[in-house]
Image (cartoon, coloured by chain):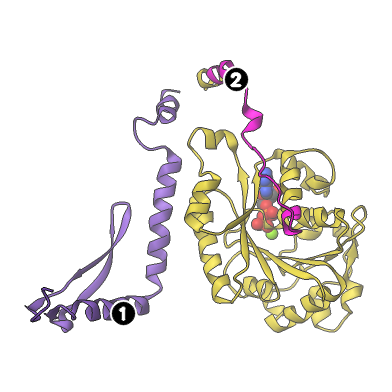
Chain colours: A yellow, B purple
């Protein structure tokens, strides 16, 4: 019984963990799953802002482990995605405010109440990462198609393996199809070849993500953007659906004439 | 523009993504060799046991190292042979 805990992690910072946690969390909740998203990035809280819930934070993860409140009290329900609850991180604290054991306790408590518990991990390979990962049943490793990010992803996959977390899959974020076509960006196949890990999502670079983050409305909530679809597809794959991969290059098809014009234009 | 045309036709050197891929391949193998002298020691013992079936070798003088060679990482060793074991030819 109980739900599934999924850690979203990476190694390198700034590759899209928080964006992924927020969007996949909302996408799962839109599929009528009860979802808790946990900000495990203690001291650098972000997930509340990306979800547009920053003004409603009262208690946080550290308050729970210190006994200042119960798990339920600290949860914040999302305004529009009613099946989604946020457990915020403490902002004015450091990572050592929570131990691995305490994290496991909180996560297993949440698993009793929710179908999915998504844990947004801090960057790095230290205690913060380990705390975020220990309570998880599954790991989603996020990378961008760049040498340093892929290398760090490899390191994280090794660490997850050594922690006994063998169930992991990869999300490649910020793919720029036009650069892939030019041969100036690692493509999905390249990254999978190198990391030999199961793929669960490919997400294009999309300026709409920055706009939606500005507004505190994750991209899956509104429009038909390609990045939004990509996150919805990840949620569907988590639910066991067999979803075809998005054709990121499709948009660029302009026929031979457009292609030649494009070539001369640059 | 000409550079782009060349990479599209697959001539005139590697594209930057191919360079990235090659560098990553080597870096990942190399990163992992950094952390396990223990595995190297095990490989050493296994090589000795295989070779000793056929040859008498100077075990003390065997040195196994990893070296970066262009776009690959190579396992390099030199094994001094004392003599061929009798019957090893079959
Ligand atoms: N696919 C994308 N397209 C455009 N911008 C993105 C994309 N994914 C993430 N970003 C932006 O990159 C930055 C870092 O993302 P974030 O999710 O905070 O990374 P992390 O949590 O791994 O540090 C944010 O400003 C975010 O809006
Ligand atoms: Mg983050």
Query: Is B81 colored magenta in this rendering?
Result: no
* Label at residue A255: 2
Q: Residue at x 15, y 74 (%)?
A: B79
Q: Residue at x 71, y 57 (%)?
A: A18
Q: Residue at x 54, y 75 (%)?
A: A162
Give coordinates of residue A94: x percent, y percent.
69, 74
* Label at residue B14: none
Image quadrant in which the N terminus of chain A is located: bottom right
Disc nearest the viewer among 1 and 2: 2
Span colored in magenta: A235-261
Give coordinates of residue A215: x percent, y percent.
83, 46
Marks 1 and 2 belong to one chain: no
The residue where tag 1 is placed is: B41
Residue A50, quarter of picture: bottom right
Q: Chain of mark 1?
A: B
Separation of disc 1 and disc 2 at Cα?
58 Å
Horizontal relation, residue A15 to residue A77: left or right: left
């Amino acid at each position: 019984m109980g739900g599934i805990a999924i850690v979203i992690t990476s190694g390198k910072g700034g590759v899209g963990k928080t964006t992924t946690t927020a969007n996949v969390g909302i996408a799962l909740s839109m599929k009528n799953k009860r979802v808790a998203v946990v900000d495990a990035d203690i001291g650098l809280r972000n997930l509340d802002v990306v979800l547009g819930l920053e003004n409603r934070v009262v208690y946080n993860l550290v308050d729970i482990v210190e006994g200042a409140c119960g798990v339920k009290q600290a949860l914040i329900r999302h305004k529009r995605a009613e099946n989604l609850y946020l457990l915020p991180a403490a902002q004015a604290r450091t990572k050592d405010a929570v131990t691995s054991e305490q994290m496991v306790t909180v996560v297993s408590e949440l698993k009793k109440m929710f179908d999915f518990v998504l844990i947004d991990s801090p960057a790095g390979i230290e205690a913060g990462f380990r705390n975020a990962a220990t309570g998880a049943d599954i790991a989603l490793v996020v990378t961008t198609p760049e040498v340093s990010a892929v290398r760090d992803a490899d390191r994280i996959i090794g660490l997850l393996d050594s922690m006994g977390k063998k169930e992991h899959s990869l999300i490649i974020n910020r793919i720029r199809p036009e650069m892939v076509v030019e041969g100036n960006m690692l493509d999905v196949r390249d990254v999978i070849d190198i990391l030999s890990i199961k793929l669960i999502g490919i997400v294009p670079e999309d300026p709409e993500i920055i706009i939606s983050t500005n507004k505190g409305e994750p991209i899956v909530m509104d429009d038909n953007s390609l990045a939004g679809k990509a996150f919805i597809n990840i949620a569907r794959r988590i639910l066991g659906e067999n979803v075809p991969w998005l054709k990121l290059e499709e948009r660029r098809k302009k026929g031979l004439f457009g292609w030649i014009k494009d070539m001369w234009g640059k | 523009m000409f550079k782009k045309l060349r990479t599209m036709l697959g001539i005139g050197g590697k594209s930057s993504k191919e360079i990235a891929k090659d560098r990553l391949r080597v870096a990942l193998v190399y990163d992992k060799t950094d952390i396990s002298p223990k595995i190297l020691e095990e490989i050493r013992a296994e090589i000795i046991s295989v070779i000793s079936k056929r040859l008498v070798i100077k075990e003390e003088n065997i040195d196994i190292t990893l070296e970066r060679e262009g776009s690959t990482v190579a396992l390099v060793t030199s094994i001094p042979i004392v003599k061929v074991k009798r019957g090893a030819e079959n």
